Image (cartoon, rainbow, N blue to C red):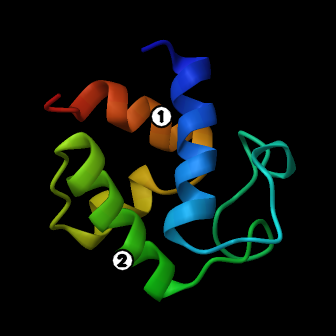
Amino acid sequence: MDNTTLRQQLKEQLIKFLNLTDLTPDDIKDNEPLFGEGLGLDSIDSLELIVLLKKEYGIDIRDPREGRKALVDVATMAAYIEAHSKR
């Protein structure tokens, strides 16, 4: 899967897994921060994203520092998946 397709898929998964029903994939920018001033996600959402990575891509993140590096924005998540996916 190419990076553009993966980023689009991630946006759709973010909306579905985090129940962000007021957003569309087009509303989420590739480099928009997922936490804080960007998308406004919180620590519970980060746990959901870690579950998503495990379930959908076979990536098991156990170290919180690793999670912070991987879950910056959609583009960073896509690059992390490409580098670490077991599928």
Image quadrant where residue 55 sits: bottom left
Instruction: Read off the residue under disc 1.
Output: 78
Q: Is residue 63 left or right of residue 10?
A: left
**Which comes before the other along the chain, label 2 or label 1?**
2
Q: Position of residue 39 (x, y in %)?
A: 74, 67
Identify which residue is drawn at 57% across, 84% down.
Answer: 42
* Residue 17, placed above or below residue 4: below
Q: Which mark is residue 47?
A: 2
Relative image position of residue 10 (x, y in whole percent)? 54, 43
- Given residues 27 and 78, the one toward you in this image is 27
Classify 10 Å Cα crowding around label 1: few (below 14), some (14-19), many (20 and above).
many
Q: Amino acid at mark 1?
A: Ala
- In x, y percent, where is residue 35? 64, 71
State the SS at label 2. Answer: helix
Mark 2 surroundings: few (<14), some (14-19) or many (≥20) residues within 10 A = some
Q: Quadrant of the N terminus?
A: top left
Name which residue lies at 57% across and 58% down: 14
Q: Relative to the observer, which residue lies in front, 24 or 78?
A: 24
Q: CA distance from mark 2 to mark 1?
A: 17 Å
Rendered image: mark on residue 33: none
In the image, residue 6 sits, relative to residue 9, either above or below, namely: above
8 vs 78, left or right, is: right
Compared with 44, 5 (above or below) is: above
Residue 30 at what x, y percent from top left? 71, 39
The amino acid type, in three-letter code, at marker 2 is Leu
Please identify the quarter of the rendering in which residue 36 is found: bottom right
Residue at 17 percent across and 28 percent down: it is: 87
Q: Residue furthest top?
A: 2
Q: Secondary structure at mark 1?
A: helix
